[in-house]
Amino acid sequence: MLLSIVVPCFNEEDVLTRFHDHVADELAKLEGEFEIVYVDDGSRDGTLPLLQELAARDPRHVRYVSFSRNFGKEAAMLAGLRNAAGEAVVIMDADLQHPPELVHRMVALHAEGYDQVVARRTREGDRVTRTLTARVYYWAINRLVDVELVDGVGDFRLLSRRTVDAILGLGEYNRFSKGLFSWVGFRTTTFSYENAVREQGRSKWTFGKLLNYGLDGLISFNNKPLRAAVHLGFLLVLVALGHAAWIVGDALVNGVDTPGYVTLLVAVTALAGVQMVMVGLIGEYVGRIYYEVKRRPHYLVKETHDGTSGGASEAR
Ligand code: UDP
Ligand code: MG
């Protein structure tokens, strides 16, 4: 059996060699062949020269694809999956936060017949605020989207060939892998591992990026948020009607009076706010449609280990 390891890399020169040695060691212990598919996501440091060196040193096991610029981890994973030939594919981060020792466990579970073997990290070592936000977010999002999203579950997982093919068949431009993996289904199993703190380099996640990622998850799967907006609209109309009836009744019984400046101000600003959010929400969906209809490629390839196009021109 051929096992492929897909590794998206963005400015990972500090850890890459260590990562490679570690993974290659682990994989050599396994029965069967393996290949490591590195995707250089437009790194601006020495990542690409390192990959060239690795490929020259070990051409049997190392393949790489290098992007023309930074296209993001989602695009890098897609390129990796497209270029992976294995019967099973493991996606791993380059920063050693995904312990290579776990690969043999994944392979064993795959041999038992699982199509997706998911490693779920505990949140030990994370900041309390981050853990808490994550918990609230997952609680809320699972009420809004159809697919199940689990906290701590990321891209570190093994996928069977048919799962990979199913994912490659999803040609959408806005890719939210966490949801796509869950959407394709098949026999899935999850095991937990202890969270490793990043050893070198820095996480590329800023608060703003996390927030946008969260919104992506919410909007990528269905139009339930739009439906919720409609419900809220109805609710507000009902409240307004009730309030109007009450004012009219009050005027009939107690005579006309004109207080309520504050009420008016609050009502107007609140409603304006709600409307802005809703218009923004519609805009989000329209924006997505805009990107989808352009049918641009997810990434452009600058070079590969063997000088091929690396699947760049493949239609989505
Ligand atoms: N990565 C990438 N493109 C990007 C950002 C990140 O390919 O634009 C890769 C990065 O090299 C690493 C993995 O995605 O292998 C996870 O990135 P990071 O460690 O920054 O994220 P975190 O572990 O904090 O979620
Ligand atoms: Mg990391």
Image (cartoon, rainbow, N blue to C red):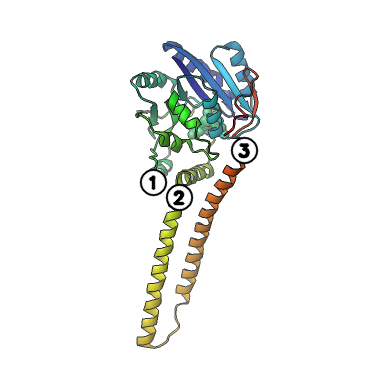
Q: Which residue is mark 1?
A: 136
Q: Residues within 10 Å of mark 2 (few under 14, many from 20)?
A: some
Residue under the point 38% across and 48% down: 140
Most extreme residue toward the bottom is: 255
Image position, residue 42 (x, y; %) = 63, 30
**Which kind of residue does numbered mark 1 sit on?**
Val
In the structure shown, which secondary structural element does the residue marked by tag 1 occupy?
helix
Nearer the viewer's eye, disc 2 or disc 1? 2
Determine which residue is flagged by label 2: 223
41 or 22: nearer the viewer: 41
Using a 10 Å C-alpha cutoff, classify the residue at mark 3 as few (fewer than 14 neighbours), some (14 to 19) or many (20 or more). few
Does residue 3 lie above or below 118 as drawn? Answer: above
Q: Position of residue 167 (x, y in %)?
A: 47, 31
**Which element type, helix, strand or loop, lies under badge 2?**
loop
Name the amino acid type tagged 2. Asn
The foreground one among 109 and 173 is 173
Amino acid found under the numbered disc labelled 3: Arg
In the rendered image, the vertical position of residue 72 relative to residue 99, given as above or below? below
Task: Decide which of 57, 158 is in the foreground and name it.
Answer: 158
Q: x, y percentage for residue 10?
A: 58, 29
> Disc 3 designates what residue?
296
Q: State the image quarter where residue 228 is shown.
A: bottom left
Which residue appears farthest toward the left when viewing the image? 112
Where, quadrant-wise, is the N terminus in this rendering? top left
Camera-side mark, 1 or 3? 3
Alpha carbons under labels 2 and 3: distance apart: 24 Å
- Figure disc tally: 3
